[in-house]
Image (cartoon, coloured by chain):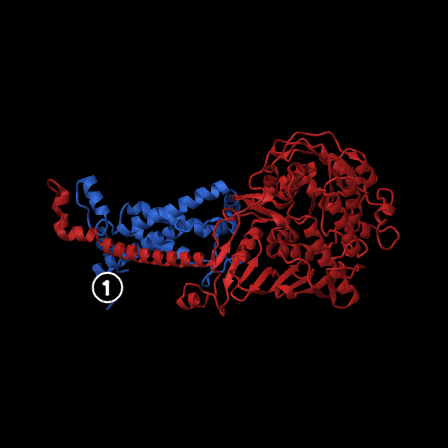
Chain colours: A red, B blue
Amino acid sequence: MTDQKKPTGNEWLTMSRRSVLKALVSVPVFGVFFVEFLRKKAGDDVKRRALLAELGVSESGPAVIRNAISRPPGKRIRLGIIGYGGEGESLVRHAGFAHPDWIDEARKNHDDDPRDKELETYLGQDDLNVAVTAVCDLFDVRAERAIAASQVTQRPGGGAANPPAKRFKRYTDLLASGEVDAVIVATPDHWHARITIDAASRGIPVYCEKCMTRTEAEAVAMHDAVKRSKIVFQLGHQNRQSESHQKAREVVNAKILGPITLIESTTNRNSPWGAWVWDIHPQGNPQTIDWAQFQEPAARRVPFSLERFFRWRCWMDYGTGLSGDLLSHEYDAVNMILGLGIPKSVVASGGVYYFKDGRDAPDVFQAVYEYPDRDLTFVYSATLANGNNRGLVFMGHDASLRVSGALTVSADGESTRFADKIQSGTIDPSRPMFTYRPGSKGIDAVTSATAEYFASRGLLYTYRGGRRVSAYHLHIGEWLDAIRNGGDTSCNIDRGFEEAITCHMATRSYLEGRKVTWDPVRRRIV
Amino acid sequence: MPWTPSPRFQVGTMVALRVLIGWHFLYEGLAKLLNPYWTSAGYLAESQWWFKGVFVAIAASPGAVTVVDYVNMWGQVVIGLGLMFGLFTRWSAIGGIVLLALYYIAAPPFVGYTYPIPAEGSYLIVNKVLIELAALLAVLAYPTEQSFGLDRFLARKKSGSIPEPLAPAVLESTGHD
């Protein structure tokens, strides 16, 4: 073979034409690859551009993000915490005061599973320049725990350590003490209105947990009091800070979905914890718990009960069950995205079908709301005894929008608006035409099933510029910003009133076994 | 009488195998490069078996994921070009084997392991990643690039001698057993 002769002079020139061609055998293959690759890329690009132009939304994060630029927290705000149970402790932590036990546990969780980033997220929080100066809790152990948290030295964002908070046995003394500039109310629902109204009468800003109140009358009274006093008020629907909910609003505003006739929101949980069977503290007893004070605003007085104190959501005396707990979140998300307001009517049903532990709050609950002015129905459907995740779906004539941690828009096969594009193959109705996944670079795990439920609803974490931040932290930060610099909060008293009334309409329909309607003139459920 | 494939057929097969694997690698790499949302994090996070800890830790660290993503995307492109053109073929094949081995051990289809992203076929221990890996071992074992690849030019330049067309001889010697 010519290839095997000894080379002389310039080998390149001595290679036979045949062997050069052999060496270059891949070139035509690459040519085919290159041409086909460009053809595919051009086709995909044209499709994507046509689609995005048609939809009028960008693939990037929401255009307007509140708190995207955090303003330097000027004046230090002295916070009082009223109610330091699970939620209260969480809110105080997100304000920058994690109990040392929590830090130890979060560190252990991270060591066990590096995907668990709770501690990292916490330590990455901004310093909000607040001090927890006062605490009121009816259970001694929790009050002590709050005091311990108030003076921690390991603070996120380089915050300084503070002197221990002062304990008050009654919230009225806390409000009158002059020790607080603002209060967080994280008590059971039956206390919300009374505390908020008293705080408002003293001009003290309030961050109040949902559901805003336990009853309709309380909602009206609280709305009036907050309006009159003009205090800065924030209701604890932290989903308002969720990037995917803000993006969903952008999608709806771009009118991609066409006329929306049905919204389906759901809750599926399947664990005792998710059904409010919370831990009973071993030190809880009539000596450490002020039971008489606990049930002061309750509809009925009953003998001391650890179950009722620690698992209060199971009883309608203190809350409204699924309605005030999880329907309230779902409704607020929908209200934020669509601006629905209070519905015309509702029919609700359900029952205690699985957790027959003496509770009277239903563990299976459905509510069907009518909005004839908006030509749509909003359905809420929940069970606490099944974990089939059904999500939140907005159904329009042209497309469906599914909102969870990520956001998906799929064209409807029978859409009028997209008919041409479906026909031409630019849009494939069997696949999402638009997805948005906040913080998609990097993943994280959440540990418990209940935490997963919240995370999928944007209730635990959201993203700012790709960085994972707690929605609670942003929600508290927004409230503090409004206290310092003026402006409104995203879940102000008007949104809170809508939330409370909407939930109470369902509760009333369930309790009375009939359809109820809202009279906007007399501001009454009838 | 046993059928003996011709050396031409044997070499042609090996060249085709090398070029096709190169094509696959190149397109996998380019497709990732052109997708701004692509990340290996999801795949790594669902890792199973002995190396789960390492892969999950990488997935959980945005810095590590970024590095892994870049190495993976560009690695695939470079390996793909190398295999297709027969350039630095040995190193390309070794690189490809390493990458495929990592994909395999990250999510092996062993009994008892399930993955949230369903596979497009049915696999028990052996999957397409493992087969592609074995195919690259064959590419390594029966080199063709000295005749059918740019390595031919490199070899001439480096050694000053014209390389033997190894593949047919090797293949022939193992053709009857």
Residue A257 relative to residue A516: left or right:
left
Work out whether residue A120 or residue A497 is closer to the camera in this orientation and state it: A497
Which image quadrant: the C terminus of chain B? bottom left
Q: Residue A6: x percent and y percent? A: 12, 44
Q: Residue furthest bottom?
A: A414
Work out whether residue A104 or residue A68 is closer to the camera in this orientation and state it: A68
Q: Residue furthest front?
A: A521
Which image quadrant: the N terminus of chain B? bottom left
Q: Residue A20: x percent and y percent? A: 17, 50
Residue at position x 52%, y 43% from top?
A465
Q: How many marks?
A: 1
Chain of residue at mark 1: B
Q: Secondary structure at mark 1?
A: loop
Residue B153 relative to residue A217: left or right:
left
Residue B140 seen anywhere in this rendered image of the structure:
no
Residue bearing mark 1? B4
Q: Is residue A504 above or below residue A414?
A: above
Disc 1 marks which amino acid?
A: Thr
Q: Residue B74: x percent and y percent? A: 37, 46
Q: Residue A355: x percent and y percent? A: 75, 60
Work out whether residue A271 or residue A124 is closer to the camera in this orientation and state it: A124
Residue A512 seen anywhere in this rendered image of the structure:
yes
Work out whether residue B152 or residue B7 is closer to the camera in this orientation and state it: B152
Residue at position x 74%, y 50% from top?
A223
Residues packed near mark 1 inside 10 Å, few (<14), some (14 to 19) or many (20 plus): few
